[in-house]
Structure formats: C-alpha cells, structure tokens
Amino acid sequence: MAQEYTKLSREELISLVERKSEEVGVLTEINRRLKGHFEIGSLLKEIMNTTKKILNSEACSLLLVDEETQQLFFYVTDDSGSNLDQFRIEKGQGVVGAVFESGEPLIVNNAQQDPRFFKGVDAETGFVTKSLACVPMTLGRRVIGVVEVLNKLENDYAEDDLQILETLASQSALAIEYVRANEKRSMNERMAVVGNMAAAVIHDLRNSMQVISGFSQLIALQQPDQKENCEIIRSEIDKLVQMSQEILEFSRGSKISISPKNVSLIEFIRNLHALNKTKLSEEKVDFQLELLEDVTISIDVVKMQRVIQNIISNAVDALSDDRVIVITGGLIESKAIIKTMDHGQGMDSETQKNLFKPFFTKGKAGGTGLGMAIVQNIISSHNATIQVDSELGKGTTFTLDFPIVN
C-alpha cells in the first residue's frame, strides 16, 4: 500500500489525505453522537451527504430490510434524493437486492448495460443511474440493509471506494442498532407500566361490573319489560372486562386469547353494518355496504367486531367533506376479505410505517397509541393479515384477509 502511495502526484496525495480526513471526521462525529442523545434520521442523512461528498457521487441511499416481508425499503437518502418511500425491492432483485442476498459488495460502472441492474426506480423517478457501488450493512452475521452511492462524477468506482463505503455502512448499522436497543428497552419499560395499571384496573373493574350486573338482573326480575335492555347492559359489561383483559395480555407480550367459531362472513359484515349505520348517520356519514360471494371464516365475533369498530372510528376522525365509508365483505380472488375504505385525509408514509407500533399516535386528540397495536395482535391471533393502503388527501383502505374454513 505504501508503495502505491509513492506513485501518486502531490495533488493526488493531498486529495487522498483530505478524503481520509473527512472519513475520520464523520466516524468521530458518529461515535460522539452515540454517547449522547440524537435523532437517528438526521444523523443518517448527514452520513449520506458526507458519503456522497467523500466518494464524489451524485446520490447516496441507505435501505433497510422489512423483517416481516424481507423486502428492502429506502430508509434515508441524501438531500438530493427523491421521495422513494413507496418503493420496495425484493431480495435478489437488482444490484441492491443481490448485495443484500449475498452479503457481498458490488461495483457496477455501466449500470444501464448490466443485466443485474433494476431499472424500476429510475423509470419512476426520472433519475438516470450510470454507475453505482453498493455494500451490505451487517451486524455480526446478519445483514440488515445496504448502502449505495450512485454516479461517480469523475472516473469509475474502485475498490478503495468500497472500503470507505463499508466503513461508513458499518457505523450506520451500529447507530441503527443502538437506537433500536434503546427503543426496545424503553418499550419494555412502558409496557410494564401499562401491565401493572391494567392489572389494577381489571381487578377494580370486575368488582364494579359484578355489582352493576347484579342490579341489572334484579331490574329484569322486577320489571320484565326491561329484560332486553338489561341483557344489553350485561353484554356491554362483558365487553368492557374483555377489553381490559386484552390490554393486560398485550402488555405481557402474549397473543390475545380468542374464542373463535365458524360464521358466515356476509352475516358478520351485515350485522356490523346494522350496528353502526344509525350512529354514523347521526354523524352525517354515509356508511355503505358491499356484499360479495359468501364464505365461512372462523373468528371471535366480539373481538373482531371491536377490530372493525376501531378502524371505522379512525376513518370517521379522518373524514372531511366526502363523508363516505364503504365496508366490503366476501370472496375476492379466492380470499376471504373484509375491506373498509374512506376518502379522508389519508396517511403519510411515516404514519403507515408506524401505525401498528405500540404508543404511536398522530393527529388524534387523546389517543393512547395502543388501539391499532391491539388490532394487529387480535388479527394475528386469528392467523389473518391486515394491510393498509393510504395516500395523503385521497383516503385509506384497510384489507383484512382471513383463512377460509372448508
């Protein structure tokens, strides 16, 4: 290596020293920040901008893997980056996907002619990728993402560029892991508090509800014409106790217990629509029902009603002028589907990404941030899935996909 440096001109040596100095500077800054409080997004954006400068490139991006789908998504880009939130890259797809899958760095200096290059992002953004260098972000033996630089402004990417990129990618991975570890510790602490509170609430709630339930039975005996109303009171008491129990189970990190039974999906949706139509009409909401081919599913009716109620309630809060909510149920492409669709304000990419995380709430006064997290837990307990598709200013669609009972 020393012999190689002796062949460089004075200007090249100065340039090399300056680049190494910048590299050391950014590493020092990362380590300094890790010792205190910092915001991970802004730190990584600074790293991307510095990496782009050091490697004399047009753009720089950091992609992380979605642990559930195993797809790569753009976590942060440099200041020149387009809005890439909607893009997902499959394992093995393109240069980025190949680097993630193999865990080995790659240089492609003629991207448009290379068969490994994926042109989808360029086609959507208008950016023209001419060359790129890409390295994996690893923690131990686990690859958590990749970092790429695009379009070297002078000459081609070389091995020493990869070495610098690998060093910065490694430090970025450490910063992300540091934040995730802190978030997990903080989350566990918060969930422990919720669990303790829930246990105390359930104890007191059950005692109070037993008293109310006893009086409702007494009223039903003394006034038979009120028997139906008393049954409703007892039913609502059971729901309250169950909701509290769900919070307790969720706070302990376990799946919420369910008591499923086989039901007609169409009948379930029709009953749910009837329960909500009058109330939503009072709120000037046109609650529309679309029924497709019927199919049998196995669900805990009470808990699944609560899931849909939560989604509908959030939809109502998001509505503005176009006060329409559509619920659709039935067989769609051989799947048992329930969909809710609104034309409300929609969600940005950050909200969609964090929607099902505990304690995340945005734009809802008095929200606890547990509602959608518990919704996902209930869905998971049914071996079902929930998907959200949303766009700012255009509305949101939730799709629930259930196993079919043969």
Image (cartoon, grey):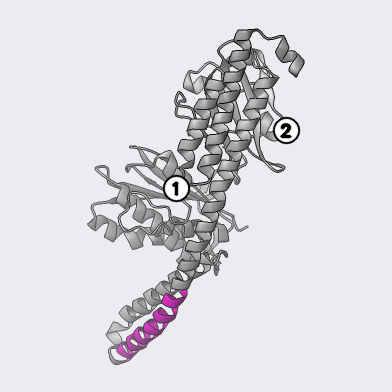
Instruction: Tell me the quadrant of the picture where the N terminus can be found.
Output: top right
Residue positioned 31% across, 47% down in the render = 318
Residue at the extreme top: 9
Location of residue 142 (image quadrant) = top right
SS label for mark 2 = helix
Q: Nearer the viewer, residue 168 or 108?
A: 168
Nearer the viewer's eye, disc 1 or disc 2?
2
C-alpha distance separating marks 1 and 2: 35 Å
Residue positioned 65% across, 13% down in the render = 113
Q: x, y percentage for residue 172?
A: 58, 37
| Residue type indicated by callout 2 | Ser
Location of residue 57 (image quadrant) = top right
* Residue carrying label 2: 102
Q: Nearer the viewer, residue 185 or 403?
A: 185
Q: Which mark is residue 316?
A: none
Q: Nearer the viewer, residue 3 or 118?
A: 3
Q: Nearer the viewer, residue 70 or 65?
A: 65
Residue bounds of the magenta highlight: 199-221
Q: x, y percentage for residue 311?
A: 40, 54
Decide: is 60 above or below 355: above
- For label 1, the crowd category at 10 Å Cα-Cα, with few meaning under 14, some 14 to 19 and many 20 or more, is many
* Residue carrying label 1: 398
